[in-house]
Image (cartoon, rainbow, N blue to C red):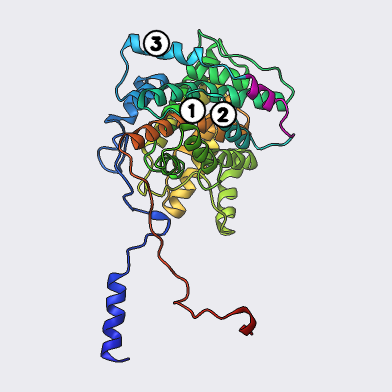
Amino acid sequence: MSIAMSESLMTEVKDRPAYSPGLEGVIAGESALCLVDEGEAGLLYRGYAIRDLAERSTFEEVAYLLLFGHLPTQQELIEFSTQWIDHAVLPRLLEVFLGSVPPGSHPMDLVRTGVSLLGMVDPDAADNSHDTTIRKSVRLLAQIPLLIAISYRLVNGKPPVRPQADLSFAENLLYLLTDRKGDDQSKAMARVLDVSLTLYAEHEFNASTFAARVTASTMTDLYSAVTSAIGTLKGPLHGGANEAVAEMFLDIGSRERAEAWVRGALAKKRRIMGFGHRVLKKGDARSAIIQQHAESLSGICGDRRWYEIATIVEHVMEQEKGLRPNLDFYTAVSYLLMEIPRALYTPLFVCSRITGWCAHVIEQRDHNRLMRPRALYTGPPRREYVPLDRRT
C-alpha cells in the first residue's frame, strides 16, 4: 500500500463519526426527571432517592412529583386523588371497542389501540400547552387501568368493575385486576403493588421513553407519543421480562428443582430472564427494595415457594455468571402471590410508566428540538447508473 493511500485511509477512519450499537452510552438529551447512577447517588426521581419514595411515599405522591415537579402537600394530594378518581371512566367509543375485540387479542395491542382511541375523542388532544398536557396526563393515569381491566374481564367473561373512591390507586388496581380488596392480605398485596408501581414509574431514556420523546419532538399530540411508547414496551427485549420470569418460576415448580433447572438451562445456553441491565452493570438498586417486600408478602400469604425458588436461582446466577437480579425478578414473585394474570404484567407496567412517559413528553415540549440523528452508511460506494435495456 502506498504512503498516500495509507494516509488517505487513516484520514477516513479519523473523520468517521463515532458509532455505538444500540446507542449504548450515548448522551441523547438532558432531563431533570431521573438520575440512573451506580454510585452513591443511586436512582433519583427529581432528586429524591428511590428507596425513600418507595418506603415513605405512595405511588400517587410519586406520580404527582413526576408530573408537577415537587412532592404534593396534603391538600394537593387530596385534590390529585380526587381528579384521577373523577377521570376513571371510559368514553362510550372505548366501551364499544372493548366489546368487539377479536378473541385472543394481545393485551398490549388493546392498550395501544385504546390509548389511540382516547386521543380521538379528547377535545384537548391537539392542545400541546404545558398545563393542558398535564391534565391529559392525569386522565390517562386514571383511564389506562380501567382500559386494561375492562378489556381483560370482558375477554374472560367476567363483569366489569369500577374504581372506588375510598381505595388508593394501588388498591383500586388490585381490585380491578383480581377482585381483591378490604381484608388484611389484600391490603398487604396493595402495599407491595404500590411499591412496584413507584419503582417502575421512571428510568431515564429507556427504549419506550426515548420513543415517546422522539415522537413528542415532532410536536405531535400526547396520545401519539404515548402510543409510540406502548408499542415499544410491547417488545420482549423491553417489556414483558417479569412475565417471562414468572413463567420460569412456574416451569421450575419447586425449590428442589430450582438449582438443577438453572444449571441445565445455562448448559443449553438459554437466557435466564430477570438478570442484568444495559445501564446498571453492577446491580439494580430497585431489586433489593422489591425483594424485601416479596419476602414479607410471602410470609403474609403463607406461600414461600416462589421466593425460595427465586433465591436459589439468584444464587446460581451470581455464582456461575456474576449477574445480579434486576427489578423484574422479585417483582414476578410478588405478582404471582397476588395472582395477577400473567398476560397483564406488561400492561401493569404501563399503569406505572405512564407517569414517566408523560413527564418526559412535557419536558421535551418545554425545551424542544426535533430529534434527527444520523446513520453510519455501510452500503457500496457510488455506482454508475445503467439503463434498464443495458443491464445483464
> Distance of mark 2 from mark 1, alpha carbons?
7 Å
Amino acid on which disc 3 is placed: Glu
Q: Quadrant of residue 92?
A: top right
Find the magenta span and give its range. 92-102
> If the image is split into quadrants, where does the N terminus sit?
bottom left
Q: Quadrant of residue 68?
A: top left
Between disc 2 and disc 3, whose residue precedes? 3
Image coordinates of residue 67 in percent, x first then y, are: 37, 26
Q: Quadrant of residue 234?
A: top right
Q: Is residue 144 above or below residue 15?
A: above
Residue occupying image coordinates x 32% and y 16%: 72
Residue linked to disc 2? 120
Find out whether the residues at labels 2 and 1 contact each other: C-beta distance under 8 Å. Answer: yes
Q: Is residue 105 left or right of residue 208?
A: right
CA neighbours of label 1 inside 10 A, class few (<14), some (14 to 19), many (20+): some
Image coordinates of residue 350 in percent, x first then y, are: 51, 32
Residue occupying image coordinates x 45% and y 21%: 138
Judge whether residue 31 can be spotted in this image.
yes
The mark found on residue 79 in the picture is 3
Q: Is residue 103 above or below residue 210?
A: above
Residue occupying image coordinates x 50% and y 13%: 85
The mark found on residue 125 in the picture is 1
Viewer-proximal residue among 28 and 178:
28
